[in-house]
Amino acid sequence: MSGPSQRRISVLGSTGSVGCSTLDLVERHPERFRVVALAAGSNAALLADQAIRTRAEFAAVADHASWPALKMALSGTGIEAAAGADAVDEAARRDADWTMAAIVGAAGLAPTLTAVRQGRVVALANKEALVCAGALFAAEARDACATILPVDSEHNAIFQVFETERRSAVEKIILTASGGPFRTLSSAVMSTKTPKEAIAHPNWSMGLKISIDSATMMNKGLELIEAHHLFAMPEDRIDILVHPQSVVHSLVAYVDGSVLAQLGSPDMRTPIAYALAWPDRMMAPTPRLDLAALAQLTFEAPDPIRFPSLRLARDALRAGGSAPVVLNAANEEAVTAFADHRIGFTEIASVVEAVLETLPSTGVHDLEAVAAADRAARVTATGLIDRGLIGNRRAARVASAGAAD
Ligand SMILES: NC(=O)c1ccc[n+]([C@@H]2O[C@H](COP(=O)([O-])OP(=O)(O)OC[C@H]3O[C@@H](n4cnc5c(N)ncnc54)[C@H](OP(=O)(O)O)[C@@H]3O)[C@@H](O)[C@H]2O)c1
């Protein structure tokens, strides 16, 4: 039973980094929250443990192979459970007031849209959903009267300082970027880096995919597209600024020269707590900012030569249509291939670039078109990776550049 003032919440992607941080906050405030549904990909053991701990009503696992383990772990608990994509969708449909969308990658698009269609408050961590279907997403949210709360620390920061009622006074948005673990390295050195080195983020503790995206800076490219959709801001009014300390989470510049920023320690529980309590605020056990101890905050321009993903994402946003879908899907395949040691670190961006060159942008007016563009990009990317064509492309480029010199 939920209390009269308890917020009924569901967490999609509960076993991941954002999902675990969300439940950490929820479990610290049992009087404020009632857990309705939890959903995960395949980690049945952790999902069952979370469902029992939080007394969730329903637990869904996407992977059918994980169903026996989930069923056994929850037997006799009274918690309903199910497996498969439909079960994850049901978790998104269950009667909650607030849903955390924290599934990683384009896999999160359908269940996140299902939550949006229920007209709820949707706390959005799954940036790939917005990258793939930003315009459709906004239309669905409008039609269903859903509220989207950005959870990404940068977008949450902007949300906190963006004066919506004075939108015409906003000159630009400035997204900060840590620069990742390879911020100061040359491309040649980066090309030798292993997955283990790429996921060792200097400031943030995050899931594997976003950690690798941070190292290539594709994460900032995806966030650029995310910011464009969330704040209806044109691409040329969104800047990226490297800020290695990850303390200033992003800034909004106004026409009178004022620049408003949100600051905090690099701990996702601050933006998640903001979204959980919105429109109020709640206590979060995050390290308090000690600016005197930090002494220095530094900023620098990003380098699109060493980090070509930034340029690719900007170009994809400008091209519109299927280009952001293709960018995202090719990146997901390339990141998986790098994590599996099938391609090198700098080849991630080469795969994305090659796929974007192979598949010119087409219009995407519905979810079927998004799914088709996503599939085509994945087939093209895996084809290039499996046939070892990425190294060859790069060698050919270097040779032709040499011939032209
Ligand atoms: N981590 C951060 O600090 C952070 C910050 C800002 C934004 N984000 C964004 O938040 C999202 C989640 O990131 P993360 O770092 O938390 O990722 P993560 O640690 O890899 O967790 C991903 C979650 O998604 C679940 N999942 C994967 N495929 C699924 C499917 N088909 N159906 C249902 N659930 C599925 C996973 O379940 P299993 O555990 O069972 O595989 C896990 O619960 C990403 O879009 C990321 O860009 C993350």
Image (spheres, rainbow, N blue to C red):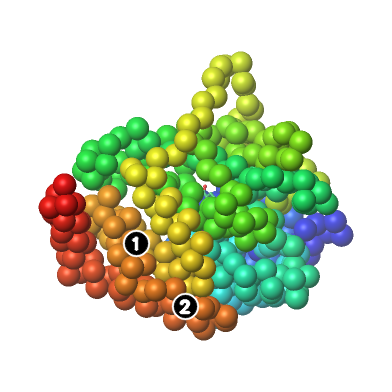
Query: In the image as oriented, which residue stretches furthest toward the right?
Result: 4
Task: Determine whether, in the image, residue 259 is placed left or right of residue 102.
Answer: right
Q: Is residue 19 in view?
A: no
Does residue 72 sit above or below 149 in this rendering? below
Task: Determine whether, in the image, residue 112 is placed left or right of residue 70.
Answer: right
Point out residue 404 in the picture as x, y percentages from the top left corner.
Answer: 16, 52
Does residue 211 sit above or below 125 in this rendering? above
Give neighbour class at mark 1: few <14, some 14-19, many 20+ (Cα, 10 Å).
many
Give neighbour class at mark 2: few <14, some 14-19, many 20+ (Cα, 10 Å).
few
Identify the residue at image location x=52%, y=68%: 320
The amino acid on which the numbered mark 1 sits, given as a three-letter code, is Val
Identify the residue at image location x=30%, y=41%: 197
Query: Which residue matches tag 1?
Result: 352
Which secondary structure, mark 2? loop
Query: Which residue matches tag 2?
Result: 362
The answer to whether the residue bearing label 1 lies less than 8 angstroms from the nearest atom of ligand 1 is: no
Query: In the image as oriented, which residue stretches furthest toward the front?
Result: 404
Give the quadrant of the N terminus: bottom right
Identify the residue at image location x=57%, y=80%: 365
Q: Earlier in the sequence, mark 2 or mark 1?
A: 1
The answer to whether the residue bearing label 2 lies less than 8 angstroms from the nearest atom of ligand 1 is: no
Query: How far, Cα to Cα, is label 2 from label 1?
Result: 17 Å
Q: Are marks 2 and 1 in contact (CB under 8 Å)?
A: no
Point out residue 82 in the picture as x, y percentages from the top left corner.
Answer: 54, 77
Query: In the image as oriented, which residue stretches furthest toward the bottom?
Result: 368
The amino acid on which the numbered mark 2 sits, given as a three-letter code, is Thr
Q: Quadrant of residue 38?
A: bottom right
Does residue 63 sit above or below 342 in this rendering? below
Count of picture labels: 2
Does residue 87 sit above or below 16 in this rendering? below
Comparing 165 with 17, the one in front is: 165
